[in-house]
Image (spheres, coloured by chain):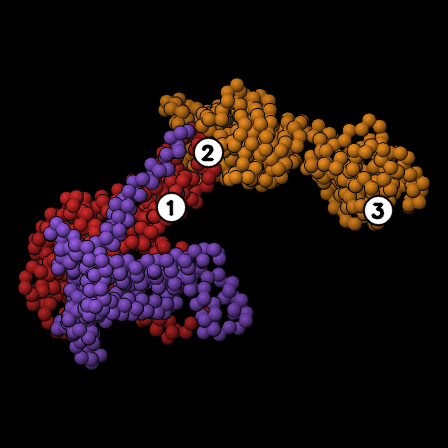
Amino acid sequence: MRSAKWRPYFFVAPAIIVFLVFFIQPIFYMIYLSFHDWNFISPDKTFVGLGNFKDLLSDPMFLEVIRNTLMYTFFTVLFSISLALLMSIWLNKQGWMYSFVQGAVFSPHIISLVSIAMLWMWIMDADYGLLNWVLSLVGLEKVPWLTDPNTALSSLIIIAVWKNIGYFTLIIIAGLQSIPKHLYEAAALDRTPPWRRFAKITFPMLSPSLFFLTIIGILDSIKVFETISIITKGGPLNSTNTLVYYIYENGFIFFKIGYASAAGVILLVILSILTLLYFKVLSKRVHYQ
Amino acid sequence: MKTSLPLKILNVIGLIIMVAIFAMPFIWMISTSLKTLGETMVFPPKWIPDELIWENFISAWNSGPFLQYFMNSVLVSVGILIFQFITVIPAAYAFARYEFRFKNVLFSLVMVTMMIPAQLIFLPVFLNLSDWGLLDTLWGLILPFATSAFGIFMLRQTFKQVPEELLEAARLDNSTDFKIMMKIMVPMAKPTLITLGLFNFITHWNDYFWPLVMTTTESARTLPVGIAQLRQVDGGVAWNILMAGNVILVIPILIIFFFAQRHIIRAFTYTGVK
Amino acid sequence: MAKIQLKNVSKAYGNNKKVIEDMNLDIQDGSFTVLVGPSGCGKSTTLRIIAGLEDVSAGEIWIGDQLVNDVAPGKRGISMVFQNYALYPTMSVRGNIEFGLENMKIPKAERKKMVEEIAEIVDLTEYLDKKPQNLSGGQRQRVALARAMVKKPDVFIFDEPLSNLDAKLRGQMRTELIQLHKRLGTTFIYVTHDQVEAMSMGDEIVILDKGHIMQQAAPMEVYHNPANQFVANFIGTPSMNILSKSMVEEKTGTITDERISYVGFRPEHAAMQVEKLAASGINLSCEIITMETLGSETLYLVNSDAGQFQVKSFQAPLVETKKVDITIPMDKLYYFDTQGNRVFVEDIPFQTPAREVRGEVLV
């Protein structure tokens, strides 16, 4: 019976060790590095206090990066959720036709971002791309989607929405299906018009799913890297440079480890706030059930 | 609740447009991958190439050490899968079924880790791996994902649902804890394990970010990184070759998706649906 | 085969929630002992302590002449049949029966023989390769039994094994279990909350309440000679009627024994008549409030000036009658003190029965 006492620790140990070594320690290491100046090659790390943070916040490029990240995140989440809401109401039906459409809509979610990025780069090609062809069919001008600073970020948002929407739709459909039928039956007996039915029953009952999607969407968008790295490399004119790509660029191309770490700490703060918010609401939701 | 015929037709047209928006790009990808370079550079674009140029796939495959990339991808995805099963099953079992000191603290650690994306910690991990000589090795791509917080969380839920009586029956049958875990719990959690396996395999098969950051030469590079670098081969962009490469990357996943659609959807929507 | 002893056993969860307090229990070798009591009385905990599924906070558990406090459940020579059968859903019937044998490192050929023998006995041979999900409730029950029997244990433990079966099957399984006990002669410990099951199956009944043993005796002893008000209430349907001393005294005169504060009688012992009865007893004029006809018997809820109580009668139901005269024989009265413990008296403890009341209320 003695060995039984240690068994649970023995069982969780491998996982916990991996977490500590590859997730928890690096967080603290990053915080440590953010207070230092280091170029990765030299043996010395110079302590600079909050110097890196001061530099970051006074760097107009970094402020632009933050602005890009926020814009990208905000619009990606906004469009993903609102379009998915419409689509889910449409697709929330039984039958092979609907499950086929649901599957098709979902498929981009499981495709490598590499392929998605390259595929859309090709589709959004200014000269021979599919998208401009579609525009030409309705008599519109060609758009330099990814090569113009004014449209590049929006183009990336379109790609992200296209990828997200199937996943979002399925989550909302699951939310819709969990709404008890008798609520609608009661509403029908009360002669509730469809719009009111949506506003008073569907939407409030969906709010946990929508909240979840908002948080997941933000967490996912804020760490966008792949499409930027493959398609735009942050350009043109820094117009699509976002936080994670900025960290990558500074760390791996310019070897400004301390500076990149400081940017990482800022990302950490943002993620922590979102996570706390998420768990707070999540725990409330569990309590009420 | 009768719908008029025109409305029905309108509905079907709408659905077709919807499918087109999401499926057309893939068809476009395949179509491009079978064109000559010249055919890619016409406007308006052609949907069906005059002649199917299967050689594009060979060109794509031969434009880099793709066999190695492919093997690396398989080793990394499968390696992660195996490691995760080894670490996740006992941990989930312990969190679901034992009472022990620091259980809550340790489980909070799991939950915290679940919220830490690779994009946050890649820089310090890179520095660590470089100190340990694991850069540019498959270990550097496997070990950080040798366990999965999400997996522990999900499997713990499943294990918790196994009735206590079953375990007691097994204890009265003189079964060891390890045997209870492997012979009773694991078979009962089979659907969850399949779900987890699919989720992890697809995620890591597709992953571009981590292998890009943690490899500097082609020795440990995986397929997505290799495909992404196709672009840099010649000066101009050979879209037909590029798309051929991407077809190679996408097809396995689409095939799995076709056969295990329900499992995969369950795997990817698990957290949201709960 | 083995007798089981619990010596000063206590079980507490957390810091102060005591489920069982200082329990001493002897279960005779070869007996069919039923632990019965309301939910939360500690009967399942007691059972699980014996099986080793729960540790005790204090005290000793003896099986045969071995102290088993630190012996793992699988090594106590105990088989258990669970309320929900607890069959391993991913294993076939054969796998279920074999699992314990495998863990005992019994060679394969022998295992196969044992499984087939037992399957024969419980009539499951043709279902050996089926999964439990594909069996009916009764068949699952038999698989659970087979799994318990195949290990040839010293003690069988049953945790409300029949509560998931429908009434008819339950009756059938009850007799089967009694026969099984006769045939094996092994110690059976059986937990139920159903007093009918307890009375009909056990040769020894242990009645528990709030973690204490209220009485341990043979079924008829428990019925005829309850040790306290709790047992009197718990055993018998409907339960014993209890009247307070003061109410009874109005009818019978002062009760001479000071210890007595409650007087009880069983509903079936109250004689209900529409005409005068000579026998001595407490006579009450009553009004019928409700009546339940159950076929062979009829239950009445009546109101008297000594309070409400129930009467069971085996005569034809009194459909039209509203008022009746009820006599409770003196020798069928039970007496309890303020704590509810039984008070045994030698003589009828009344001063002078108030005879004059009798004549007035006759119909």
Question: Which of the two residues, B175 or C113, is positioned nearer the viewer here?
Answer: B175
Residue at label 2? B169
Q: Residue furthest bottom?
A: A139
Mark 2 or mark 3: which is in front? 3
Residue indicated by mark 3: C305
State the separation of the CA atoms marked 2 and 3.
55 Å
- Does C59 appear above or below A220? above
- Residue found 40% across the figure and 40% down from its top: B101
Query: What chain does badge 1 belong to?
Result: B
Between marks 1 and 3, how big is the CA–CA gap? 65 Å
The 10 Å Cα crowd at callout 3, few under 14, some 14 to 19, many 20 or more, is few
Q: Where is residue B206? Give x, y as percent.
A: 22, 54
Residue C273 position within the rendered picture, expressed as x and y whole percent measured from the top left:
86, 41
**Which quadrant would residue B21 be assigned to in this image?**
bottom left
Q: Is residue A244 visible?
A: no
- The chain painted red is B
Q: Which residue is mark 1?
A: B105
Please tell me whether residue C198 is drawn above or below residue A134 in the rendered image.
above
Q: Amino acid at mark 1?
A: Val
Amino acid type shown at disc 2: Ala
- Would residue A116 be found to the left or right of residue C279 on screen? left
Q: For chain C, give the colour.
A: orange
Query: Which chain wears purple?
Result: A
Say which chain tag 2 marks: B
